[in-house]
Image (cartoon, helix red, strand yellow):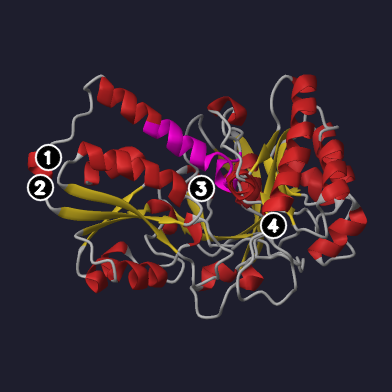
Amino acid sequence: MQGRGLTIYAVIKGLPAWKAGLRKGDVVLSINNNLVTDEVDFRFGTAQPVSVIRVRRKAGLLTMPLKRPPGALVGIRFADQGPSRCSNHCIFCFIDQMPKGLRGSLYIKDEDARHSFANGNYVTLGAMSFEDLEQICSLGLSPLYVSVHATDMRVRRAMLGNRHIPDIMRQLGFLEKNGLSFHTQIVVCPGFNNGAVLGRSLDELCSFTRGLLSIAVVPVGLTRFRRKALMSVDRDEARRICSLVMAKNEKDKRRFRSRRIFLADEFFILAGISIPPRSYYGDFPQMENGVGLVRSLLDEWKDLKRDHIRKSFRPSIRKRGRGRRILIVTSESAFPFLNKIAVWLGGMFPGVAVEAFAVRNEFFGGKVTVAGLLTGSDIIRQVKAAKPCKVVLPGIIFNDRGHTLDGFSAERIRKILGTKVSVANTLEELVKLL
C-alpha cells in the first residue's frame, strides 16, 4: 500500500481545493503530516474543517491550508490510480483460466483493500505487512472481504502459490482487535482444502467473536483453459461438504444466535439438496458470491403468485398478442428452477409459449454452469437454432457498460439473431417484458 502521492486530474473553481491553491498536475503527498497513498487517505484527511496539505509541483514542494466548511465538497478529481495488483499465483485463479482476446479489464488481478471496502472485492491480504494493516485500521475500512481458503498455512500457501504470505489468522485477529470486521470466503478445491482442512478452517474462523461477519463456502470454478490439474466438486463430494458445513453452521449458530456460515447455491444443486428457506440466509451477506440467488428468485416467484391470487397482478393478453414463442435464457444450474417459473408464466399467457432455455457454456467448458459466466457467442449460436419470436436475457451476464464477457451488447445480439431481445434483472421485470 505504499505510494508516491496522488496526482490531481482536475480542480473545480470556487470550491475549497481551488481556494487553497491546489491545481491540476499537483501531487498530494501528505495531509496533516500523514502520507497520502490513495483517495481514501485524502477523504479521511480532509474531513475536518482545516487540514494542511503538502504537494509536489514543478516549482518544488508546497504547503497550503485547506478550509472546508461543514458539508462542502472539496472539489477535486484525481488521476485514475488503478487497483493494487495481486502477487499470488493461486492454483484455482479464474483469470488464469480465461482465453486470450477478451477485454483487458478481465485480466486485472485486484488485491486492493480500498476496492474491497468500497466494492466488496475479495483480497487475500497476502502482500500486506502489519504496517499496512495499521493504515487500514486507522482509516476504518470496515468491513473488508477476505479470501481465506484455508487457515492451515501450509495448505493456504500452496493454494495461493506464495510461500511468503503472512499467517491469515494473525492478520484477521489484528483487524478484529482494532475494531474492523470482515466477510470471508473459502473456495473449495478437492484434494487441497476439503475434508479435515475445511473443518479446521471453519472452526478457527468462527473463533472470531466480533470481527467475523460471514463465511461463504463456494466450489472451485474450472474452465477448459485451465493449465493446472484440479478436481471439480462432484455430487458425492458436494454432499460431504454440505453435511460438514451444515453441522459446523448449526453449532456456530447456537453459540452466536445468528448464522455466519453459508454454502453457495451450487453446492445444494450439485448435491441434489433442496435450496434452504429464506431464514437460512439472514440479510443475504454473500449474495454476490452466489449465496442465496436461487432462494431470492424462488421467493420473488412466491410473491408474484400471491399477487396473482389477490388480482393485483393480471397480465394483459390483448397487449401481448398470441402465437408467440418467448425464450427465457438461463444457465444449466438455474434451469430447473426457472423452468418451473416459465411453465407457470405460460399458464398466465394463454396462446404464448413461454420457455426457459438453458445455454450450455461451451466458451468456458461444461463445468461452468452459472448464469453470470454465459457469453454472447454461446447464446447466439444456441438460441438461433430455436427460432424464437422473442428472447429475454438475464441482466447478470452484462457488465456495467452493457457487455458480456466476450464483448456482446444486447443490441448486437438482437441484430445477429434477427429477433426481439430484452434484458431482465428481476422476475418482475421479466413478467413486464412478456
Query: Foreground residue, 391 or 151?
Result: 391
Question: Marks 3 and 2, Cα distance to the nearest angstrom?
Answer: 59 Å
Residue corresponding to mark 1? 317
The kind of secondary structure the magenta stretch mainly shows is: helix
Cα separation between marks 2 and 1: 6 Å
Residue found at x 50% / y 80%: 101
Q: Is mark 2 on a helix, strand or loop?
A: loop
What residue do we see at 34% from left, 70% from top? 380
Q: Which mark is first along the chain, 1 or 3?
A: 3
Determine the secondary structure under disc 1.
Answer: helix
Q: Which mark is residue 17?
A: 3
Quote the CA–CA distance across marks 4 and 3. 54 Å
Question: Up-down: is 62 above or below 254?
Answer: below
**Residue for badge 2:** 321
Drawn side of residue 138 relative to residue 143, left or right: right
Q: Distance between the residues labelled 4 and 2?
A: 45 Å
Rendered-image quadrant of the N terminus: bottom right
User: Which quadrant of the figure has residue 37?
Assistant: bottom right
Count neighbours of disc 1 (C-alpha within 10 A) and say few if under 14, some if 14 to 19, many if 20 or more: some
Residue flagged by tag 4: what amino acid is it? Answer: Val
Crowd around label 3: few <14 · some 14–19 · many ≥20 (10 Å):
many
**x and y percent of residue 376 in the render?**
39, 68
The magenta stretch spans which residues?
Answer: 286-301
* Amino acid type, label 3: Ala
Check disc 4 and report the residue beneath it: 233
Q: Residue at x 44, y 51 (%)?
A: 335
Instruction: Name the amino acid, label 1.
Output: Ile
